Image (cartoon, helix red, strand yellow):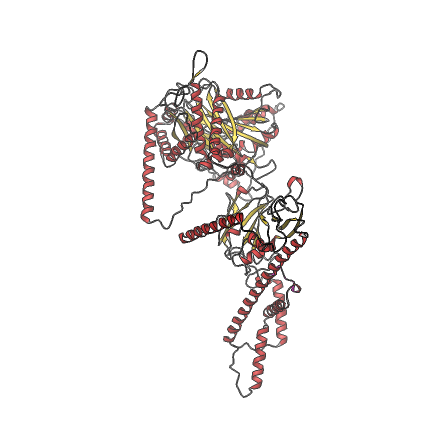
Amino acid sequence: MRTSQEEKEPASPGARLMQAPGFNLCILAVMGFKTKIDLELFREEISQKLSKHARFSKEEIKDPASPGARLMQAPGFDLCILAVFGYKTKIDLDLFKEEIGRTLARHPRFCSLLITKNKMFGTFSWQRTNVDLNKHIIAPKVNPDMENPDDFIDDYISSLSKSQMSHDKPLWEVHVLNVKNSDANSTVVFKIDHSIGDGVSLISLVMACARKKPESRFLPPVANKKAREEKVNPKNSLLKRLFVLVWTLILLVFNTLVDSLLFLATVLFLKDTKTVIKATGNVELCPRRFVWRVISLDDIKLVKNAMNVSINDVVLGVTEAGLSRYLSRRYEKHDESGMKITKKGSGSLPKNIRLRSACIFNLRPCAKLEDLAEMMEKEKLLKGMWGNLVGIVVLPLTIALENDPLAHIRRAKSTMDQKKLSLGHKVAFGVMKLMMFLFGSKVAAGVSTRVFRNTTLSFSNVVGPQEEINVFGHPLAYIAPSVFGYPQGLVIHYQSYADRLVIVLGADEALYPNPRQLCDDLVRSFEIMKEAVMKKGLSPFLIYYTKVQRRPDTLYFRPKNEKSTSMFVKVWIAIVMVFNTFTGLMRAFATLIFLKDEKIIPINRERGKENSSKRFVHRIVDFDDIKLVKTATNAASASILKRISLNTTLFLSNMMGPREEITPFGHPLCYIAPIVSGFSQALFITFQSYANKFIISIAADENLVPNPHQLCDDMLQSLQDMKDCVQKSAYAAEKRRKEAKAEATVKAAAAAPPAPAVKKEEVVKEVVKEKKESESKAKVDEKGRRAPNKINGLDLDTHSWGQSLQEVNVVVPVPPGTKSRSIAYEIKKNHLKIGLKGQPPIIDGELFQPVKVDDCFWSLEDQKSISILLTKQNQMEWWKCLVKGDPEVDTQKVEPANSKLADLDPETRSTVEKMMFDQRQKQMGLPTSDDMKKQEILKKFMAEHPEMDFSGAKMS
């Protein structure tokens, strides 16, 4: 079948000639009329006649209907989608029409007529036409103060299911109901013929029309399917991996064969048990009642994570449990006095009920939102991104009242796992497509109809936007899609939206006189499952943190350590853990019975004085100093603080606070100094981090510690001593490295031939010349290295970075309003990858040097930029670039954070001055201090031995 791109008629040679450069001709035809022009009549005639000409409109573009669209137009199989959109505000009709005309009405399927080409074989094509929004957007006048708005909306939506779409216009309508109900301030009902597209396509289109905010141009984030990474254990033998592969293929073939045979049996003879909810006869055009309930998606995820299943497994289990409760109620029997007659087992349910659901599977990868938005904006062709491409799978449901409510979810998981490892839905789709090609759409529709007639209900689960969005200029509260025209009595849809999950029922009024009761049974079944999960040991702390995000504007993530640990290391860690646990228990027991601290200093409190008066003091130190000592000694912060408070009788606590300054209760916070009173010791020391500060808090007994400020000062001095020791060690190591490098340079120079003598004037001229050339190169030397920025890094087009000897800080700008869930990141020992999901990575390359993955973090700053902190593995080396391949920085021009010579001791100061002198000499091409000393020694030796010939002498 040819696509619409192939059916475009090429321009004639004459038309091509008229469009040649310098030959653009236009016709001005002046027509004089005998009467005054009736403008409305004139426009109508132009629209009916001239605009329908192939050269005066776009209607020459005809796109043949897909097999799915042809199937939806088969007799007795007219399906329509009813999508209820609840909005948080009243609908501004003018703005709503403007947004519809700018987005939805420009979609190729929403501005095309469905034309019948061959009625016998059921072939159709799409033909472009002009869209009159007044014929598509219907806003009935309603009383905003009516008594029962919920019943009015239900009745209005139900009335839409009693009529089919008219084919004299594009197959869609929008009904605007500006009345407030229990779930939203206004309701919009989209009635769309199913031949336009399936549910997944329409939800993608809605998201392509949506924006995060009314004034935003950014598309909302979507839930991308994570590619499954098959982790292959190298220890597994080739034979074992081959066995697993063969067994998987056997299961795939077996499950596909079973599903195909069950599908064939359902088409031919296999029917569900006749129950009170099983449709019989032609129910396609029977009145439908549409109801929905909104539940928390976080609760669904709670059950999903606790049972290690998928969301599809949970909602299928909820469907099975809810139908069991509803059928049990429908089959209840009462005695003459009206009392319920109960039975053992499954209550009043009939035995051996066969009840199945026709589950709809999407077979097409979802189109990118950017492509759909561009398609509407520039009126591009679909190119296979749209239509009905779904498969049908028959799912068995067990109708029983279980003592364990979670048994429904386990059974649903087993069923879904078997269906996932099967190609039955693709086989069914291929057979239907083949039948349509051989026998036409009527026969294919008849086969599909028998599948739906022989089952009880249809089931579908569609993923929606992950965040609240604005659709057609108004903030959206919920989405409740459904379908009518099926030869079934019940259709159940599950639609996610932000943090909500909407359960939607489309029920036949004759079979389901009270569909709200079924909706309540589904919700109640899920609540029972949630309670059962919590009773099995899920703590309220985990429940709270499943729902609550501590800071939505700034989030920190620690990447997983992907290092594999050997068995020997694991055993050794276990032995050390057991030994330390035993030692700790023995010390605690000894302390409880007899072991006491010695009274070296009078801070041991007597019993019964826990409530004596206390003095609370605190000091604030630089958190970077704590990190400096921690990094240099390769110890944790808690161990450093413990060494500061050594040999004291106290309680010690170390708590990590916010990594950035925050504004709780509407005011900016300066520091946090927590402390505890009422303990048995005379001293309680708390260490609290906050942003770049570290607070030391002390609660001391006034009688035993009369001057707690002195203790605070002593702790600060101890930290300063540690810091000075670390800095001295660092400078000593740097000095040794420089001396070793200088010695190697001298040895290399000794092996080289002597340089010719150069006059002083020539050296000065050469230095001035090199200085001018370096200035003219705009801070780029001959090796392509650039001068560092203020933070010892580089400012590039896509990001900027800076460094200290210990850490590297990277800042990556992102579009304003970016959420943390939209960020794709990967931090490994030698590799960094950062960007936005669905887009090419901003940074993706091998790091200049390895980093400590456990000490690396990233954060989202004000939803405008990504800040990345990388901790160097070698913390005595400057990085030339962030990732290999980037422009390099001249590390000789890097300025350390502590660059004041006056702050250094005399020995270190002389070493640094010597290094600076040698660096300047090398830049000017002059000998260093060591070279000058050696030259003086050589001259002195030559003067003492004039009889010797030094013409061939070399420096060594």
Q: What is the span of residues highlighted in magenta in the rendered image?
A: 894-901
Residue 853 percent coordinates (x, y): 50, 52
Where residue 770 appears, as percent x and y from the top left, is 61, 68
Q: Which of the 4 image quarters holds residue 415?
A: top left
Q: Residue at x 45, y 25 (%)?
A: 322
Expressed as whole percent of the image width and height from the top left, the position of residue 87 reads: 58, 29
Residue 197 appearing in the image:
no
Quarter of the figure with the N terminus? top left
Q: Residue furthest bottom?
A: 947
Residue in front for this viewpoint, 956 or 902:
902
Q: Pick out the residue farthest to the top.
A: 336
Can residue 393 be seen at all in this image of the molecule?
yes
For the point 44% across and 22% down, which residue is it? Answer: 326
Report the predominant secondary structure element of the magenta stretch. Answer: loop
Magenta-span inclusion, residue 895: yes
Tell whether position 594 is magenta: no
Residue in front for this viewpoint, 774 or 902: 902
- The front one of 513 and 65 is 513
Horizontal and vertical percent position of residue 177: 58, 24
**In this image, 413 relative to 811: left or right?**
left
Circle count = 0
* Res. 45 image quadrant: top right
> Which residue does the image show at 64% across and 49% down from the upper left?
698
Q: Is residue 91 left or right of residue 438?
A: right
Residue 244 lies, with reference to residue 930, above or below; the image says above
